Amino acid sequence: MLTKSSTELVRQRNSVLVLSVLRRHGALAHTEISDFTGLSSATISAITTELEKAQIIEKSEQQAASGRGRPRVLLRQRRDCGYLIVVIISSDAVQYSLVDYAGKLIDRFSEVRSHDPSGAARFVTSVRAGLLRILERSRITQEKVLLISISSKGLVNSTEPVLLWSPIFGSEQIDFESALRPEWQAKVILDNETLLVAAALGEREEIAKGADFRSLAALSLGHSIGLGIVRRGGQTGQEISAPNFGHMLHMANGGLCRCGTRGCIEAYAGFYAILRSAFEVPLDTIPAKFVPVAELDKIAAKARQGHRTSAFAFRQAGLALGNGLSRMLSLTERMPIAITGPGTRYYDLLRQGIEEGLGQSHVVRMEGMPEIRVVADEQILVFDGHLNRALSVIDQDIVLSGVQSAE
Amino acid sequence: MLTKSSTELVRQRNSVLVLSVLRRHGALAHTEISDFTGLSSATISAITTELEKAQIIEKSEQQAASGRGRPRVLLRQRRDCGYLIVVIISSDAVQYSLVDYAGKLIDRFSEVRSHDPSGAARFVTSVRAGLLRILERSRITQEKVLLISISSKGLVNSTEPVLLWSPIFGSEQIDFESALRPEWQAKVILDNETLLVAAALGEREEIAKGADFRSLAALSLGHSIGLGIVRRGGQTGQEISAPNFGHMLHMANGGLCRCGTRGCIEAYAGFYAILRSAFEVPLDTIPAKFVPVAELDKIAAKARQGHRTSAFAFRQAGLALGNGLSRMLSLTERMPIAITGPGTRYYDLLRQGIEEGLGQSHVVRMEGMPEIRVVADEQILVFDGHLNRALSVIDQDIVLSGVQSAE
DNA sequence: GATTTTTTTCTCGACAGTCGAGAAATTTAG
DNA sequence: CTAAATTTCTCGACTGTCGAGAAAAAAATC
């Protein structure tokens, strides 16, 4: 359904555009904003004075004039305009980061997650405590926290911050909205971890390639398997999705997965699956909860020395991934694939299987092998993705709510 | 990347909105348009007088006043504002339809496609002849044809009207744009057939459910297997895609498909595949080009009487479809599935396999079985989908180009 | 038959937004 | 000290939407 447009909407969109340009390029002068956005100088004046009145941006003090002519007045976001808390949930720890409106990290700490299966209720209280702790440490009032951005592996509701399924809590759902609502009035968003990796890579790609960028998939290899897809959307920037790739069906009635289903991709390509198949344990045994990476390193070392069953385990994992990726490509379009996560250290062993698995499908035979690249530093990408998404959400919200009310 | 907004853009969008409402509801009065669009009466006046000046809409003659008060002046599209030619390519025929701007069918005929493998070049010339023929029969000048909307089974380039792969011509590509360009200045669009089915069903669904509608998949069963997905998009109405579902990998190193790859879904669920498996022909034999439906009816009859291998063939087909659908659902979101096409007459035989195939995956176990419905009249849906898409493209183009130039 | 009521359409002034041009500000070059 | 260069700011023109009320026209009422 189409919706009506109005002039206020125009102003809103252009205000968001100005903020996003400021975010991407740092402090900018009047004329530079005009160049980047394509808006006229007069419009920039109107928008920036409005944003300045609303205490969202500020003029920086006169800096040493570099060229001749009237010196530039740089505009930048006011750091204290609002704050963001990033919560990254991983299998063994929860990391809390406090970030200001300009995207600068103020404080950060990690809390080791106890491995007892005490379940979701107890986890939620620990998150609430963690949030209060980071707030207290930095003496910021709670109202100044505009957004809490959470990420986890697993399956996430696309509209509400509800964790539907995760490798940690299984199908014990966690609704962060209702868990934090009495205490916090900040908006809460929840994203799949690999989706954020994809978002960060998409951002980098768009900066590098500009309009040539079309789409990209990020594949995260580890204890579990994640996939994120970024596509350049029509008007509203990029479109991101995190399919349930790890638990897509690889082979009917196949190996038993942690999720209880048989034949998931993860049941062949997850760390525990590689371990299981290397030790020739029957595929229907209940998989180990946690696999030390050292254990897998040993198998990899054996595989590299020519040990058959070890090499075979990695090959099987690669095949599952390749088949799965080929299915994903059948349903979307040709796009480059970036592989991240701790599993990239075994890429030499996985590669042949992945390529063979890809090659078994019609799309790949027709369109050729997609570009595959290995990208390290998954942790940094996850954090970048958080900032990316969260700060643009904040920009949007500020313009929608803050500007006219500050009038 | 965000793009700048301007006031003209607002007018354009609202003009398109008015046209789309007129399209959806037929001739409307001033006030009704205002109600449907949410725009004020004054704005409607401005837009409609502009469109009237540009000869896109017209005031209908005074009709018998129904209520009291000043009688309504109905506004409707001018039929002669422009025309649309719909070309539906199926395996045995090509159907040409001439439609006016209001969506009314003016002329239609079919040409039987010769089965000789003379290839794409000859086919293109026959399409050019067909287009000229329908134009001639109805005494419309060529400039008045604003759009040629073509559909075929197979894989289509998403941005240009290029048929990349089709069950008829294989990977012999056909670029309709360049084939028709010297002769026709009309815009040419090409869509996958099942995508249009999905579009038509999505439209119906949106009318029925309104804002509750989220997404829907259409699965077409026949000689080949097609899938179309509709999702409600942010601003610009619906988002439609036609993945290469029929040739998604079902099983590595599986049965040989018409496309030359092994293990495609179609190699298990296409008509020829069902035939092959019912007669216990080895799965690596080159499949028959055309299978008379009567032949399949016979197998179905045997299966319904309890014949084992015949029933098994349908069950295998169902499993392939169910596995494939489960993979699709893993990569998208839970959505209802509408099954169309000639294969629906065997749904009773396919059903169990489809449901079992779906049930083997994590998503379905978690979220439950998706709603599956059988929808007849695929041909009508294809045509409706054509109108749907083509006329909204025309509306867009007219507003973008026609209005200010007619000033 | 004249007047009132009701409904629809049209018009006008107010307001919001963008743009181009040119004025104002301010520094460097000569 | 003056001219050139460069950036910012302001003003008037233009386009767009909206609300209110005038104008139009038929039905209802007296």
Image (tube, coloured by chain):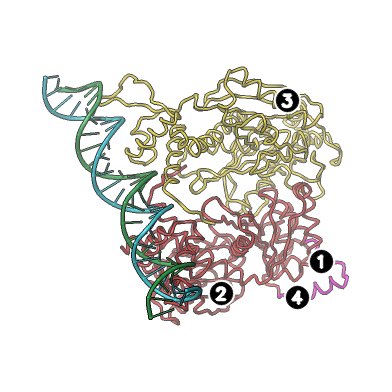
Chain colours: A yellow, B red, C green, D cyan
Residue wearing tag 1: B280
Check residue B310 for magenta coloring.
Answer: yes
> Which residue type carries mark 3?
Ser
Of marks 2 and 4, the one in the foreground:
2
Q: Residue C28 at x, y = what percent?
A: 23, 21
Judge if badges 3 and 1 mark residues of a common chain: no
- Give the magenta range: B292-316
Q: Which residue is mark 4?
A: B295
Among numbered discs 2 and 1, the one appearing first in the sequence: 2
Residue carrying label 3: A126
Q: Are marks 3 and 2 in one subunit?
A: no
In which quarter of the view is residue A318 placed? top right
Is residue A295 highlighted in magenta?
A: no
Estimate how packed mark 2 is, as few (under 14), some (14 to 19) or many (20 or more) residues with alpha carbons within 10 Å.
Answer: some
Q: Secondary structure at mark 4?
A: helix
* Mark 1 or mark 4: whose residue is earlier in sequence: 1
Please tell me whether the stretch drawn in magenta is mainly helix, strand or loop: helix
Q: What amino acid does circle 4 point to?
A: Glu
The disc numbered 2 marks a residue on which chain?
B
Between circles 2 and 1, the one closer to the viewer is 2
Say what secondary structure mark 3 lies in: helix
Residue tagged 2:
B94
Q: Amino acid at mark 2?
A: Val
- Regarding residue A381, the answer to whether it shows in the image is yes
Q: Quadrant of residue A25?
A: top left
Nearest to N terminus: mark 2 or mark 4: 2
- CA gap between label 3 and label 1 equals 61 Å
- Name the quadrant of the C terminus of chain A: top left
